[in-house]
Amino acid sequence: MPAYIADSSVFILGMPLPSSPRNRTVTTPDVIAELKDMRSKMALEAAVDQGMQIETPLPHLVSEICDHARVTGDLDRLSETDIGLLAKALEYDGILCTDDYAIQNVAGSLGIKTEPIAQEQIREIFEWGMRCTGCGRRFESGDQTCPVCGSRLLGYRKNKKRL
């Protein structure tokens, strides 16, 4: 059975995780740090009591996720927590439980399965780039200011692919 990788939205929204003993459930220490209210902390404790494991992401997989997210243009949209969850999903070939669209976008482009919590799942994956609002030049990603004219850069969809 697949491993389920739990994002913080699982605990914040109090959603149940698969409880079969054959289904391994994993989250990361960074997810725990995101939980601020008592209800979400209690949901986390209940999941740990049911066998959920808390594991640190493997550094080489974190690097792989960062490299891939840089290619898709999502790196600036992902937090360290998001990157760690993606690394865990890659490690276990697991199902990532999340509502975060940037996470789903990177996961989809890597072939990682996702399961939404409360929102609809994405139907398309995108590659993102940056476009200057002044001179119109296009860049892969990075700064928020155009290196040519100094105007603000905005994200745009370079490519899309239907899932």
Image (cartoon, rainbow, N blue to C red):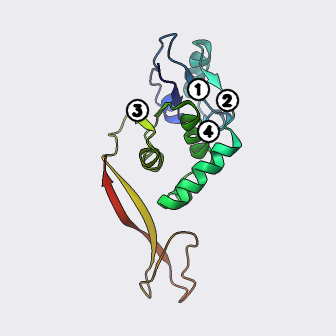
**x and y, in percent, of residue 30 in the image:** 66, 38
Quote the CA–CA distance across marks 2 and 3: 21 Å
User: What amino acid type is highlighted by mark number 4?
Assistant: Glu
Residue 117 numbered mark, or none: 3
Q: Is residue 64 above or below residue 98?
A: below
**x and y, in percent, of residue 119 in the image:** 35, 39
Q: Could you tell me which secondary element the residue under label 4 belongs to?
A: helix
Q: Is residue 91 above or below residue 139?
A: above
User: What amino acid type is highlighted by mark number 1?
Assistant: Val
User: What amino acid type is highlighted by mark number 3?
Assistant: Ile
Q: Is residue 49 visible?
A: yes
Residue 108: quadrant of the picture = top left
Label 1 vs 3, first from the N-terminus: 1
Residue pushed farthest top? Answer: 21
| Horizontal side, residue 29 vs residue 22: left or right | right
* Residue that carries the numbered disc 1 in the rendered image: 26
Marks 3/4 in contact by CB < 8 Å: the verdict is: no
* Residue that carries the numbered disc 2 in the rendered image: 55
Which residue is painted at 58% across and 26% down in the image? 26
Label 3 vs 4, first from the N-terminus: 4
Marks 1/2 in contact by CB < 8 Å: the verdict is: yes
Label 2 or label 3, whichever lies nearer to me, is 2
User: What amino acid type is highlighted by mark number 2?
Assistant: Glu
* Residue that carries the numbered disc 4 in the rendered image: 34
Label 3 or label 4, whichever lies nearer to me, is 3
Residue 111: quadrant of the picture = top left
Which residue is painted at 43% across and 40% down in the image? 99
Please state which of residues 10 and 129 is positioned toward the viewer in this rendering: 129
Quote the CA–CA distance across marks 2 and 4: 15 Å
